[in-house]
Structures are given as structure tokens and as C-alpha cells.
Image (spheres, rainbow, N blue to C red):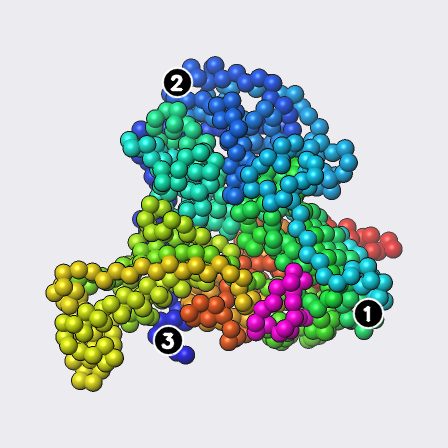
Amino acid sequence: MSYRIIGQPTPRTEVAGKVTGDARYTADVLLPGTLWAKTLRSPHPHARIIRIDTSRAEKAPGVRAVLTGADVKGILYGRRYRDVSVLAQDRVRFIGERVAAVAAEDLEAAQEAVELIRVDYEELPAVFDPVAAIQEGAPILHPDVNNYPGLPKPLEKPSNAYVRDIYERGDLQAGFGASDLIVENTFTASRVHQAFLEPHCCLVWIDDQGRVQVWSPNKVPHGLKQSLSAALGISKDSIRVNPVSIGGDFGGKGAPMDEPLCYFLALRTGRPVKMVMEYQEELMAGAPRHAAVMQLKTGVKRDGTLVAHQMEVLLDSGAYGGLRPSAIVGGAAHGGGFYRIPHARIEVTRVYTNNLPGGQMRAPGEPQAFFAAESQMDCVARRLGMDPLEFRLKNLIEDGDQTLTGARYQGIKAKETLEAAVKAAKYGAPKAPNIGRGIAMGYRSPGGGATSLAVALNPDGSVVLHTSLFEQGTGTYTTLRQIVAEELSLSPEEIQVKILDTDLGVPFDTGIGGSRGTRVGSGAAFQAAREAREELFAIAEKLLGWSRSEIALNGKEIVRKKTGERRRWDELLSRVGRSVTRQAVNRDDEHSPVTAFTAQVAEVSIDRETGEVKLLRFTTAHDTGIIMNPIGHQGQIDGGVIQGVGYGLMEQVVVEDGRVATLNFGDYKIPTARDIPELRTVIVKADSGVGPYKTKGIGENPNSPVAAAIANAVEDAVGVRIRDLPVTAEKIYKALQEKGKK
């Protein structure tokens, strides 16, 4: 089916405001009487708090409130799983944990007062490695874990391994017994930060009616409202989250951060309280992607047929687990693979350690797991003497097959996507010495959820789309405008977008994330626009006497198809004296019937003398449904690949004995323009998709396999396998030296 607007390159709706400075971010909101807040953070990874002396801080100029853990005793918050303390309760569990907070007339006064607080600690044994943390005798960081709201399953006894997800099929031991070759490897992945330009920040005010007004760059405003209600013990109706622009997210801005603390400071002072993290605090105490230790064991027949596969993933949760949507990180199991394997077991465990807490980042759990699983596939193929491409094509799932986590999808195009990628990358072409090409794959279905929006056609000719989604940079507003424009025969520029606070719209909205924006939002926009159009036709039928079956829209005009007569619909609405407004609720939270595959080929060159690795070219292929906006679609692909390059080659939140050593962007490296190779994109069209336009997700898909493709290319180039992310020159040089000795 052809469309006028859908599928056409469309400029982003919100970019003008961001370029001109008209966009309103949380840091731009300053209410009369606003106080500034700062926190004192722990210098120890694990210690008992013996005494806190705040007397000097309380007397400091400009100070209006000082809070400690005693003032917020027993208050725990989180994004469904609640284990995070507003301020440390009796003990600290990581370097950077908030111990005390100050609200003052200005930022300088708050910082000076924080430095006057004195804390006496008794240091306790700490554990920094998730493997060590689950051993007998390791210090238990959360003895009360079974009392935390949202824990999926009670533990037999308190443990640092507080949640475990297991997927099994067949008989694993029988599968290994029937294998001709068994390959075992351990892979590790470091923490990486989302590196959004806008750090975590918030403003909280308890207004004259006792309502809690919140400004926060949170992509799940209704979820934030729900989390605050549960943590603070106040009704959801007493909380309003106000719309602001979000200065980057990449998964990191979905959970509460400083909002509960600012609430208590606002409650104490009776004034609005603002808090903005410095980037040093972001890197020290934000919520980065989890570090991981992954053990894999794979059994195959001599002809390359996969028989058995075992994957055990330990995710370093750090000191707390509530800074993500739930206790479980399901993506790690999802990343276990998409191959036909009759006997398999995937186990994912989140483990408390005395490191900074892990949170949510683009495709949570999947980049770690795909790095391990796709590296393992290359290792197995090379042990068999098979080309990694041949090995994958032999074992990839097809229509009717289940993934290793038991999911079934329609219209699987794994092989077609891989074949398109290797063709575009010229995978089999001759290579110069020390040049390597590596393959990796991934897949992801769009997340489900619920949203509501309204479309209003007004007597002044304006068309307004009302939505409670907060745009975080993925172009959702642009997509929604395209849909309304398509259904109402307008141009996207004629559709105004009005952002609703959480008092308006619906009782709950899932928000943005998990590649769900288009899947969930498109259904609501389509329905609301169609219903508004039908109501407009009914008005025309009544006022003009035209049969509804012979009416069509052409821009701002209603056209009688038989005769070509035309009337402006704003004039008809003026005659009836009202707008046409239709609201639609779309709840599409079932398991997606379709998924989208990604196949990638990295080409690298290695300097054997130094280990330096250069990424020469990167090809990424995606099977897609209808592409709503080619500009936005390609932007998501390029951005995801570049983030994957950072994960694969350079990014790392370095933590030494619980202390973060990379506290600025001079030490924490992210890719710049000079690090980006030639990028090639291949689109494999598919007939299947979700929603009224049959779309597939793209937001997270390009990100996850990149690191594995790079690691596989390095081995292809110089014959050394790097099992620890990031793949740096130092690691390659060391591996080459060890290989030379052998």
C-alpha cells in the first residue's frame, strides 16, 4: 500500500526549539523561592555510619534544611523493585552513596554547607566482584532483601544473588553427551555510561494545595508518578509530573533518582527544591549499563550442527537494583542466541556488590549477552574449521522455530538479513594481511505497553495532537504527526503537538523505551485521527446533505467526490460552534508476534607492533516493516552503531575497589567523529510488522551485536581472541605477545 506521508523523509518536530534555545529543560525551570540542593556522598564502599554531625552545616549562611538518613528512615524507592535508600540508612554500600543533603538559597551555599558535615564511619568488609559476591562467606549487602517490595521471588535465605532468571529446554547433559566437540569460554563486559548531555536533575515543589509538582527529564512520567506514590506513601492524585524536554536518555532516565530526596527537602522547607547532578556525580553514582561475567559452554556435531548450549550470566548490580524497570534484566537471556539448539539452559543472575548501582541502557542486558554469544559462535566455528558465516547459516532459526527463551515469531528473516549484510560488506573478498572481517547478529521485538492521545480539529483550522509521551530524542512526536497527517490528508507541519502533564490524558502511560514508541503510539494516533475524521464527515453529512460514502478530505477541505464540490471544514466547525476531539487508548502489551533481525560485519586493521585496532568499515543490515520516517530510521541505526563502537572499542567506567577512576570525559572516552568508520546500511523489506502500518522496532537493534562483530574481526585479522570488553590496543598487544611465546 502506498502512503502520502508515511515513509517520506520528515524533519524532526522538536529540533527547532533545541537549536534556538526555546526548548524548556528541567534546568531552565526556576520557580520563585527555589532552593538548591547538594548531597554529601560516602567515601567508603561499605561502612557502618556511627555518627553524623550536621550542626555546623545547619548554621551556615543560606541553609534552610539539612537531612540525614534518620529523617527518611525506612523509605525505599525504585522502579517497581524498591531497594534504594533516599539517604543511607545506618550503613553505606558504595562510594558515592548519598549520606546527607542540604537545601540552601544558592548552589554555592549548599556546597559549602555539605563540606561542613562530619561523619564517623566503621569500615566493613566489601566485595567488588560478582563471582566473589556469591561465594560462601561473602558479606551479605542486603540482609533484609526478602522484605523489599517488588522482589520477584522470596529467597530461601538472604543472598547477594537476589534474582535469577532461567530458561531451559531439552536435556542439557544428554546434549553435551551427544556432542562431538564442546567449547567453553568466559567473557566479561565492563560498565558503560549512557553519556547523555543533560545529567540527572529535578525540581520538586509542594504547592499551596499540597500537591507535589515535579519537573524531571524522565521518559516515563506516569511511571515516575507511580514510583513516587509507592515510595512516599502518598496518593498518585496528589502528584503531577510536568512536561519538559529531555536532554538525552539512552535508557538512563526512566527510574527515580533525586526526586524522592527533593520531595523531603521541599516538605521540610515549604519551598521548591532543585537538584542537578554534576557529571562527576553521574559517573560516580549514576546508573550505568551493568558489568557482566558470562560463562558459555557449547556442544556441536562435527558437521557443525549445534546440539547443546549453556550460558550463565552474572550481572553486577552494584549496591542497589531498583534503578531499572524491574529486578530482572530479561535482555541478557534474550541475548543468549537465535539458533536451533535442542538442548539449552540460559541462566541470568543479578548480584549485589559494593560498586555503583547498575541501571538501564539501550537494549538492557542484550549488548553484554550478544557479545558473549556471538563471540562464542565464532569460537565454535573456528574450532570446527568452518567459516563463521557457513556455521551461522547452518544453524539460524527459521519460521516455526523457537528462540532459546521459547519465543515464536512470524516472518523470521534471519538468514536473509545475514546474507544481505555479507553481500554488501563483500565478506568473502580477498584481504590484505592483518585485515579482518567479523560477523555478529542480534534480534529484538518491539516492547508493548499502553498510551492514550487525542486529536482535536478546531474551528480556527488548527489541528492539535495531545499526548502524554515525553520525547527523549527518538522522534516519536514526528512519527505521531506523520500518522495524523496521513489520516487527515494534511502535511505534518499543520499538526501541532501539545504535551500533557500526568494530570491529563490517562491514568497511566507506559512512556518511551524498549523500542515501543511507534508500536504503541501509532495505534492510538491512527485510531484517534480516523475517529476524528469520521465525526467530521458526520457533521458534513448533516450540514451539507452529502452522503458520507462520497466524502473525502483534501487538506483543510471536505470534497464531494461525485461533483468536486468543496467546503472548508473549519467553516463547518464554526457553524456548529465546537471542535471535533477524539481520544484513543491503545493497549498493546502482549508479546510481539514479530521480531527484527540485525546482521553486522566489521572490518578492522591491526598494527601488530602496537595492537592498535582501526575500524575501517561497518555494515549493518536490518529486516524492517514499513519505515515511518527514513531520516529518523537511519539516525537510529547510525546512533546505535556508534554507541556500539564505543562499547566495543573504548568505553569503560573504570572501577577499582569500588572507586570510579573515570570521573570526567577526559578519562571516560566516547567515540568522536574521527573514530567513526565508513558506515553502510542495508534494508531487508519484510511483510510482517505490528500496528496499523506493520512496523518493526529499530531503536535498540543496531546497538547490541557491534562489539561482537569487532571482536570477531580482530581474531580474523591476527588470530587472537579478546574476551573482555572493551577491545583495546593493550589487550590485543598482550594477546599477540602471549601467542608469540606459545
Query: CA–CA distance between discs 1 and 2?
Result: 75 Å
- Secondary element under disc 3, as helix, strand or loop, is loop
Above-or-below relation of 465 to 651: below
On the image, which quarter does residue 527 sit in? bottom left
**Residue sitting at x 51%, y 73%:** 688
Q: Earlier in the sequence, mark 1 or mark 3?
A: 3
303 is within the stretch colored magenta: no
**What residue does disc 1 label?**
301
Above-or-below relation of 286 to 603: above
**What residue does disc 3 label?**
3
> What is the crowding at mark 1: few (fewer than 14 residues within 10 Å), some, or many (at least 20)?
some
Q: Main secondary structure of the magenta part?
A: loop
Amino acid type at mark 1: Lys
152, 164: nearer the viewer: 152
691, 546: nearer the viewer: 546
Q: Position of residue 110 (x, y in %)?
A: 43, 25
Q: Which mark is residue 61?
A: 2
Q: Residue furthest right?
A: 742
